Image (tube, grey):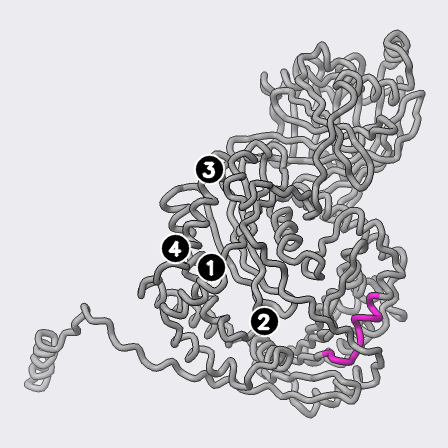
Amino acid sequence: MKKLITLVALCAFTGVYGQIDRSVRPIAAAAPIINIKNSEVFKLSNGITVILSENHKLPRVSFSLTMGASPMIEGSKAGTNKLMGQLLTSGTIKRSKDVLDKEVDNMGASLDADGGSVYFSCLTKHMETGLDIMQDVAMNPAFPQSEFDRIKKQNESGLLAAKSDPNAMASNAEMKTDFPNQPMGEVMDEASLAAITIDDVKNNYKKVFTPNGAYLVIVGDIDKENAMKLAEKYFGAWKGGTVYKEDFGSGLKANGNRVIFVNKPGAVQSVISVTFPIEMKPGASDQIALNVMNSILGGGSFGARLMQNLREDKAYTYGCYSSFEVTRNGSWFGTSGSFRNDVTDSAITQILSEISRISDSYVTNDELNLAKSAMAGGFARSLEKPQTIARFALNIIRENLPADYYQTYLKRLEAISKDDVLMVAQKFFKNGLNIIVVGNEDILPKLKPFDSDGIIEKLDPFGNPVKEMKKADITADQLIERYINTVTQTTSAKDLASKMKKVKTVVKKIELSSPQIPVTISMTDVFVAPNKEAMKIEAQGMVFQSSFYDGVKGSEMNMQSGKKAMTAEKLAAKKKGEGLFPEIAYKTSGMKYEIKGIETINGKDYYVLVTNNGEKESFDYFDAVTNLKFKTISIVKQDDDVIESTIMFDDYKAVNGFLFAHKLTQTAGEQSLSGVVKSIEFNGEYDKKMFE
């Protein structure tokens, strides 16, 4: 009992006289040197460097084959290497795509490829079968024409979606602006995709996929002896040409601040990016200090300066971040954030202010310590993955880093001071910022003060220079008349009225397909003169979207929200766009419309007609030569959100004396639907239940 009392008394004594003085920051312990097990490295006779990181915790092994070629200038065929990478897993000389997919699935394995690498992961017991597949994909791709056509079609849909994605548009503008005339700055667009042939893909493969300068990274449940034997067995006999190498430099830094604008009609928010290229290779002496500085400025933490200023203090946005991307082919700084139109200029002012502040004065001790702690924690967590160790070994070899670069990382991180942070901010944040804004052209006047010469550069969604829209040489009414005369194949108002009077019903059957949906979808579109219309979309006997309008009332149904009657506002909007060809009644229906001018797209001129029915704003593009409608961009505003969709029209054919597009492509966000008109029937029977 005495012993117990003595211990309690001792604790009390210590509590009174031995308390820590919390007003004094404890002295930090020396940063530890990380004990990272070195990967095994050896070379095959044909030049492939093999990097092995053993990990026997799980019976799995992965193989990553990375080519040593530099990116190439693709010019008018930008995107060739991307297509080549997508086609690698589409079949080999001895395995069709179906056979390849089945073999991989049966093993529960993973197979992936891109324009410079092939990756395979499987259970250890399937290792040799997996290597046979991986070798076949890397060394014997067949590039079948049918798969090339399919991949090309998928990319066409992706490009359509990108044209309505403000973040993708901003990213394209960043790369084009920071890295002009360099591989990093090449962006695939509709024209370059159309120009790419299967022979271009095959030639690109021959230049990129060669064992010379390639790396095979092996991670998992395999020892060195077996790794050496299997690497030599499956890849040692591979022959290839000289690896392509070229250094295109570090991008183009502007002399003064530039404003680059990408128009997104009807946008209620602006995407803002302040960006510029930096001259830095992975492992450079300034890189860690640069990352610490970026973490404080806006590198992902909720407490970073950009987030605290623009979200917490000003309430301009839900999030604003910054990043420094350091790669072997080009490095750059960039911000990202979406802001309301009315605060676009204010947001730019605050971003530039934070860039200036971190360049003009020291960061605080708390900011510095928090940033370094977060980075140290992230580094430590990454070491739990065996792939990290192998990646470290690959980086050391490829980037010619010191052998102990990663072992001493925490020590170098801990040594970063406020002076180092200020030094890199002053070194890199100099005049010459590219201020990229994707948004509504109504904000343009507010952007001029940020440009050093007051001239705003305009780019399209893929980062190409935009020619100013030419003034239209006809009126909106003349444009509509030309279009109506063309699609109805009439020459006068009297002839038109007589022809339309004979139309009682029109039933269209359309077959829809989408990369996101594995089944064929059917669409039935019914018009009943003079102003009734109904539509239903179904797949496998199930209707998942429908609507009808009879000139007085209407309803809409989808599987998510169920059936809803059209509101008075919706009915009023529909009233302004009634008819088989709604443009016929624009003048009398109350539709607001005006001609904006002539826009050149891929070398062809299109008249742009803007309409507004009170519910949505639409931009109709009419071919200046054929008078046919080329596409329609529709914008619907819902609260603070904007829903944008695009419909492309192609393959016009005559049916019963009228011209109809027989190919349709609709995109909304990342969703894309392609439609082929299977039949159009005039004055026949239709399902009257569609109007109930």
Residue 603 higher or lower than 661, as above or below: below
Distance (Cα) linking label 4 and label 3: 21 Å
Residue at 73%, 15% (x, y): give it: 586
Mark nearer the N terminus (3 vs 2): 2
Nearest the camera: 456 or 574? 456
* Of the two numbered discs 4 and 3 in the rendering, the one whose residue sits closer to the viewer: 4
Regarding residue 13, the answer to whether it shows in the image is yes
Residue 422 higher or lower than 461, as above or below: below
Report helix, strand or loop for mark 2: loop
Which region shows up in magenta? Answer: 204-214
Mark nearer the N terminus (1 vs 2): 2
Question: Which quadrant would residue 565 be assigned to in this image?
Answer: top right
For mark 4, what is the residue?
A: 357
Q: Which label was assigned to residue 281?
A: 2
Q: Amino acid at mark 2?
A: Lys
Q: Amino acid at mark 4?
A: Arg
Q: Amino acid at mark 1?
A: Gly
Q: Which label was assigned to residue 299?
A: 1
Q: Amino acid at mark 3?
A: Val
Mark nearer the N terminus (1 vs 4): 1
